[in-house]
Image: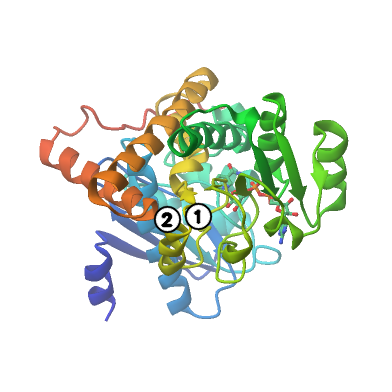
Amino acid sequence: MIFETLDTYGHEQVVFCHNKDAGLKAIIAIHNTVLGPALGGTRMWPYKSEQEALNDVLRLSRGMTYKNAVAGLNIGGGKAVIIGNPATDKSEALFRAFGQFVESLGGRYITAEDVGIDVNDMEYVYRETEYVTGVHQVHGGSGDPSPFTAYGTLQGLMATLNRKFGNEDVGKYVYAVQGLGHVGMEYVKLLKERGAKIFVTDINQALVDKAVSEYGAEAVGLDEIYDVPADVYSPCALGGTVNEQTLPRLKCKVICGAANNQLASNEIGDEVVKRGILYAPDYAVNAGGVMNVALELDGYNRERAMRMMRTIYHNLARIYEIADRDGIPTYKAADRLAEERIEKIGRLKLPLGRGRTRFQGRVRS
Ligand code: NAD
């Protein structure tokens, strides 16, 4: 049954990690290493069953292959899950035991933070292995990726405006921004700097107040965000907000934001096209975070990171070309771009260590 599933999704390797004394139950899934070592975060979650944990890690690791490939990185796709409650089950021993398993893979899998894991947990993982990104800046880490993700989202937006309206004058358009967290607030700031009119909403009133007073945004209710007269809807909070209920209400011509998994289903993605809305594929738009941590692998540098964010513009432009070329929705065109890149680069059969990402290690302090 498990091998059948791996066959369907195309995974290379799945590692079950167990350490009774440390209370560790984890699964590392390496989906594809054609482009380079598999990079993807570790999620800690109180999964109801082992099957649920396995399904999640298989789905997420495959997603990382596509995301890393479209981002143009020399990086493959992987992910790990730790079964446990992040509020009660964390310990030094748990994360060090996990780090030993990561180390045992010799660099085929490189981990990072994800839901339920923070930089302090990564410090413990880092004691056992070099194959970890998202460590503290004092160890050569890259720090909070959110400003980069916001800037990358702006690049994706400009490519999408250009495609839809024939210009990328951000300030000419009206925006509906849902979620004013780490990424959303920074994104609002970037829009404001370019003179845009912005509607905002968030469940956190203090953040809404800040967007209004500092960036001149107009506050609307949580549900009202779908009805405002905006040219661009920018989901920067939850996934699945473009769905059967919300889509008929949206007046926008463009959907472009940082949230993961914005489309509730592929059918909704097809419906978006029918309604004449241009959807900027989420994982191509929000790749700033993974680009930022990937740069840690060969020596982090903020200037290089900012330059790399600008490639998101070109990645989106390429996706729109493929959508036109093949007559397919943009969400499918993003997948196709990833698959074509993996296939073409895979055929080059690069000698290991040239043109690939190698982990240089950091100066330990
Ligand atoms: P965050 O937790 O800092 O912000 C999310 C914000 O959304 C919070 O302020 C929260 O109050 C608000 N929110 C939650 N439910 C809401 C609702 N129903 N309506 C309106 N607002 C709501 O998270 P973040 O780091 O800013 O990330 C935002 C999104 O972008 C997430 O989907 C995340 O997965 C994705 N993303 C983030 C990064 C990154 O670098 N941080 C990278 C890639 C993708």
Q: Mark 1 touching mark 2, by CB under 8 A? A: yes
Task: Tell me residue 15's x, y (percent).
Answer: 34, 63
Query: Is 241 displayed left or right of 178 in the figure?
Result: left
Q: Residue at x 40, y 38 (%)?
A: 316
Quadrant (top left/top right/bottom left/bottom right) for the N terminus: bottom left
Task: Tell me residue 204's x, y (percent).
Answer: 82, 53
**Residue at disc 1, secondary structure:** strand
Number of labelled discs?
2
Q: Residue at x 73, y 36 (%)?
A: 197
Task: Tell me residue 240's x, y (percent).
Answer: 56, 64
Q: Which residue is mark 1?
A: 42
As drawn, 362 above or below 344: above
As drawn, 309 above or below 79: above
155 and 272: which is toward the camera: 272
Query: Is 29 displayed left or right of 169 in the figure?
Result: left
Q: Residue at x 54, y 48 (%)?
A: 253
Mark 2 close to ligand 1, CB under 8 Å: no
Task: Tell me residue 343's x, y (percent).
Answer: 17, 45
179 and 131: which is toward the camera: 179
| Label disc, if present, on residue 79 of the rendered structure | 2
